[in-house]
Image (tube, helix red, strand yellow):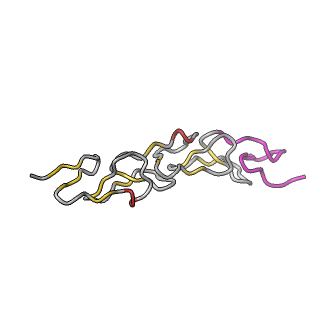
Amino acid sequence: PSGVCDGGYYCEDGSSASDQIQCSAGTFCPAGSSVPIICPMGHFCETGSDDSTACAAGSYNNNLGSTASDDCIDCPIGHYCPEASEHPVPCALGTYTTSTGANSSAQCTLCPAGSYCFQDEEVRVQLP
Protein backbone atom coordinates (compact mmCIF):
# COMPACT_ATOMS: atom_id res chain seq x y z
CA PRO A 1 0.00 0.00 0.00
CA SER A 2 1.03 3.59 -0.58
CA GLY A 3 -0.31 6.97 0.47
CA VAL A 4 0.58 10.15 2.29
CA CYS A 5 2.58 10.32 5.48
CA ASP A 6 0.50 10.36 8.70
CA GLY A 7 -0.07 13.59 10.64
CA GLY A 8 2.60 14.03 13.30
CA TYR A 9 5.18 12.35 11.04
CA TYR A 10 7.17 13.26 7.96
CA CYS A 11 8.40 11.07 5.14
CA GLU A 12 11.56 11.84 3.18
CA ASP A 13 12.19 10.49 -0.32
CA GLY A 14 12.23 6.70 -0.29
CA SER A 15 10.13 6.30 2.85
CA SER A 16 8.46 2.92 3.21
CA ALA A 17 5.92 3.67 5.96
CA SER A 18 3.34 6.37 6.70
CA ASP A 19 4.95 6.98 10.09
CA GLN A 20 8.58 7.04 8.98
CA ILE A 21 9.95 9.86 11.16
CA GLN A 22 8.03 11.34 14.11
CA CYS A 23 7.97 15.13 14.35
CA SER A 24 10.10 16.31 17.24
CA ALA A 25 8.96 18.74 19.92
CA GLY A 26 9.05 22.32 18.64
CA THR A 27 7.84 21.29 15.18
CA PHE A 28 4.61 20.00 13.64
CA CYS A 29 3.84 17.84 10.62
CA PRO A 30 0.45 17.90 8.88
CA ALA A 31 -0.48 14.72 6.98
CA GLY A 32 1.63 14.43 3.83
CA SER A 33 4.66 16.33 5.21
CA SER A 34 8.10 15.76 3.72
CA VAL A 35 9.82 18.01 6.31
CA PRO A 36 8.82 19.24 9.79
CA ILE A 37 7.55 22.81 10.18
CA ILE A 38 8.96 25.03 12.97
CA CYS A 39 6.31 25.90 15.55
CA PRO A 40 5.27 29.57 15.16
CA MET A 41 5.30 32.27 17.81
CA GLY A 42 2.13 32.32 19.94
CA HIS A 43 2.01 28.52 19.82
CA PHE A 44 3.74 25.38 21.10
CA CYS A 45 4.24 21.96 19.52
CA GLU A 46 4.70 18.75 21.48
CA THR A 47 6.38 15.64 20.04
CA GLY A 48 4.28 14.07 17.28
CA SER A 49 2.08 17.12 16.66
CA ASP A 50 0.18 17.38 13.38
CA ASP A 51 -0.61 21.05 14.06
CA SER A 52 0.57 23.79 16.40
CA THR A 53 -1.38 24.50 19.61
CA ALA A 54 -2.23 28.14 20.33
CA CYS A 55 -1.21 29.70 23.63
CA ALA A 56 -4.33 30.29 25.71
CA ALA A 57 -5.84 33.77 25.90
CA GLY A 58 -4.14 35.67 28.73
CA SER A 59 -0.69 34.41 27.74
CA TYR A 60 1.84 34.92 24.94
CA ASN A 61 4.94 33.32 23.43
CA ASN A 62 7.45 35.30 21.38
CA ASN A 63 9.71 32.35 20.50
CA LEU A 64 9.79 30.02 17.52
CA GLY A 65 9.98 26.28 18.13
CA SER A 66 8.36 26.17 21.57
CA THR A 67 7.71 22.69 22.92
CA ALA A 68 5.18 22.94 25.77
CA SER A 69 2.32 25.01 27.20
CA ASP A 70 4.76 26.16 29.92
CA ASP A 71 6.47 28.21 27.19
CA CYS A 72 3.39 30.46 27.11
CA ILE A 73 3.96 33.36 29.54
CA ASP A 74 1.26 35.17 31.55
CA CYS A 75 0.35 38.50 30.02
CA PRO A 76 1.92 41.27 32.15
CA ILE A 77 0.12 44.01 34.04
CA GLY A 78 -0.87 46.88 31.72
CA HIS A 79 -1.37 44.56 28.74
CA TYR A 80 -3.78 41.98 27.35
CA CYS A 81 -3.14 38.86 25.25
CA PRO A 82 -5.77 37.28 22.98
CA GLU A 83 -5.37 33.58 22.11
CA ALA A 84 -2.18 32.81 20.12
CA SER A 85 -0.50 36.12 21.04
CA GLU A 86 3.08 36.61 19.93
CA HIS A 87 3.52 39.71 22.11
CA PRO A 88 1.47 41.41 24.84
CA VAL A 89 -0.77 44.22 23.57
CA PRO A 90 -0.55 47.39 25.71
CA CYS A 91 -3.79 48.69 27.20
CA ALA A 92 -4.85 51.95 25.54
CA LEU A 93 -3.49 55.14 27.06
CA GLY A 94 -5.59 56.17 30.03
CA THR A 95 -6.44 52.56 30.91
CA TYR A 96 -4.76 49.92 33.09
CA THR A 97 -5.02 46.37 34.41
CA THR A 98 -4.49 45.34 38.01
CA SER A 99 -3.32 41.78 37.42
CA THR A 100 -1.49 39.55 34.98
CA GLY A 101 -3.31 37.33 32.49
CA ALA A 102 -5.75 39.80 30.88
CA ASN A 103 -7.12 38.31 27.66
CA SER A 104 -8.93 41.23 26.00
CA SER A 105 -9.00 45.02 25.87
CA ALA A 106 -12.27 44.85 27.81
CA GLN A 107 -10.17 43.96 30.87
CA CYS A 108 -8.31 47.29 30.65
CA THR A 109 -10.01 49.65 33.10
CA LEU A 110 -10.45 53.39 32.46
CA CYS A 111 -8.45 55.59 34.84
CA PRO A 112 -10.82 57.36 37.22
CA ALA A 113 -11.33 61.12 37.04
CA GLY A 114 -8.64 62.97 38.96
CA SER A 115 -6.04 60.26 38.29
CA TYR A 116 -3.68 59.20 35.56
CA CYS A 117 -2.33 55.77 34.75
CA PHE A 118 1.10 54.53 33.79
CA GLN A 119 0.75 52.07 30.95
CA ASP A 120 3.02 49.36 32.36
CA GLU A 121 1.98 49.63 36.00
CA GLU A 122 -1.14 49.05 37.99
CA VAL A 123 -0.50 52.24 40.01
CA ARG A 124 -3.03 55.04 39.81
CA VAL A 125 -1.65 58.35 40.99
CA GLN A 126 -3.95 61.05 42.34
CA LEU A 127 -3.32 64.53 41.00
CA PRO A 128 -3.02 67.28 43.64
Q: What's the residue at 49%, 52% (across, down)?
A: 57
Q: Is residue 88 magenta?
A: no
In which image quadrant can residue 76 be found? top left
Q: Is residue 21 magenta?
A: yes
Provide the major secondary structure of the magenta segment: loop
Front residue of this view, candidates 36 and 109: 109
State the image coordinates of residue 56 (x, y, percent, origin top left).
53, 50
State the image coordinates of residue 14 (x, y, percent, origin top left).
80, 46
Judged left or right of residue 69, residue 122 is left
Q: Residue furthest right?
A: 1
> How many marks can you see?
0
State the image coordinates of residue 53 (x, y, percent, origin top left).
60, 50
Front residue of this view, candidates 24 and 35: 24
Judged left or right of residue 54, residue 77 is left
State the image coordinates of residue 112 (x, y, percent, origin top left).
23, 58
Q: What's the residue at 83%, 55% (across, down)?
A: 3
* Range of residues picked out in magenta: 1-24
Judged left or right of residue 46, residue 88 is left
